[in-house]
Image (tube, rainbow, N blue to C red):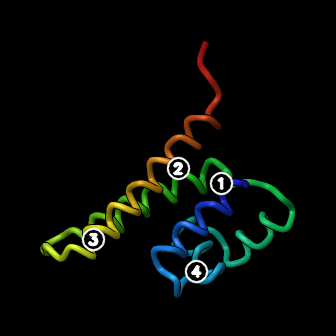
């Protein structure tokens, strides 16, 4: 499974109300058809999209933890951070190695 599909499914599991166009625009900072077109053509995310996803996951987790001690919100923040770890691994794998 491509990482873009995996990331969408993980975010959908955390927030079942999200749609593919929202994932593209709110999480990847791309046009609303980005996810659909990349999925249809069996391509994976660009480096820029992964970097945007990382920043947005971190921001969302920070917002959920800020000024509250609600266990459910903190649990969701941890889910976003776990996906962020996977995104970081994808980013590391896609970067050219320096020799």
Please name which of the two marks, 1 or 3, marks the residue nearer to the observer: 1
Q: Mark 3 points at which residue?
A: 63
Image coordinates for residue 70, horizontal then vertical, percent: 18, 77
Q: Name the residue under label 4.
A: 22
Q: Is mark 2 on a helix, strand or loop?
A: helix
Between discs 2 and 3, the one toward the N terminus: 3
Image coordinates for residue 51, horizontal then vertical, percent: 52, 51
Between discs 3 and 4, the one toward the N terminus: 4
Image coordinates for residue 87, horizontal then vertical, percent: 52, 49
Q: Mark 2 points at which residue?
A: 87
- Comparing 47 with 41, the one in front is 41
Residue sitting at x 62%, y 72%: 24
Location of residue 62 (image quadrant)? bottom left
Location of residue 5 (image quadrant)? bottom right
Residue sitting at x 65%, y 78%: 20
Q: What element carries label 1?
A: helix
Between discs 1 and 3, the one toward the N terminus: 1
Residue sitting at x 36%, y 68%: 60
Location of residue 32 (image quadrant)? bottom right
Q: Which mark is residue 91?
A: none
């Amino acid at each position: 499974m491509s990482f873009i599909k995996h990331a969408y499914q993980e975010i959908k599991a955390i927030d079942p109300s999200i749609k593919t166009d929202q994932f593209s625009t709110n999480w990847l900072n791309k046009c609303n058809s980005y996810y659909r077109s990349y999925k249809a053509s069996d391509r994976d995310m660009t480096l820029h999209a992964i970097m945007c996803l990382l920043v947005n996951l971190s921001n969302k987790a920070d917002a959920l933890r800020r000024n509250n001690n609600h266990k459910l919100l903190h649990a969701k923040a941890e889910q976003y951070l776990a996906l962020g770890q996977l995104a970081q691994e994808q980013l590391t794998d896609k970067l050219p190695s320096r020799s």
